[in-house]
Amino acid sequence: MRTLLLCLCACLCLFSCKKEDPEGIFIRVRNASQYPLENIVFVDNPQHTYGALSSGQISDYQSYARASYLPSVTVTAQGEELPHININDMPVAGLEPGRYTYVLDVIKDNRGGNRLTVSLEQP
């Protein structure tokens, strides 16, 4: 009986504990392209470096300050540094505190060259 009561108390303690998300904006990067991506850098204030990601890989979260800036991204795919693109429709300043994922994809443009696309998803 004592063991049962102890197990019941332990279960209640475990299930009643609520994991709270830390306050702030946390962003990670997912490589949705078929190519490995290298030198992934979000240029903002301050700069966030995500390094390299294999196809389908997701980075760790990084903390972003809530400021009024528009980030941009640079990346290398297939040994080619892709043009720096501004992420005008996804300002960090407009994000509510939480966890987000920038999804990077490399597609072929009309001339057969690589072009980077970025979208934002909230898990």
Image (cartoon, rainbow, N blue to C red):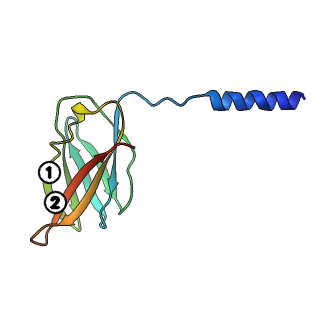
For label 1, the crowd category at 10 Å Cα-Cα, with few meaning under 14, some 14 to 19 and many 20 or more, is some
x%, y% of residue 29? 33, 49
Residue displayed at 38% across by 60% down: 56
Residue found farthest to the right: 1
Number of numbered labels in the structure image: 2
Q: What's under tag 1, amino acid-wise?
A: Ile
Task: Residue under label 2, please give it.
Answer: 82
Q: Residue at x 21, y 65 (%)?
A: 107
Q: Quadrant of residue 44?
A: top left
Q: Do labels 2 and 1 touch, CB within 8 Å?
A: yes
Q: Is 73 rendered above or below residue 56?
A: above
Position in image of residue 116 (x %, y %): 19, 58
Front position in the image: 32 or 45 = 32
Q: Nearer the viewer, residue 48 or 66?
A: 66
Q: Nearer the viewer, residue 62 or 115?
A: 115
The residue tagged 1 is 85
Q: Nearer the viewer, residue 75 or 11?
A: 11
Question: SS for tag 1?
Answer: strand
Image quarter where the C terminus lies is top left
| Placement of the N terminus among the 4 image quadrants | top right
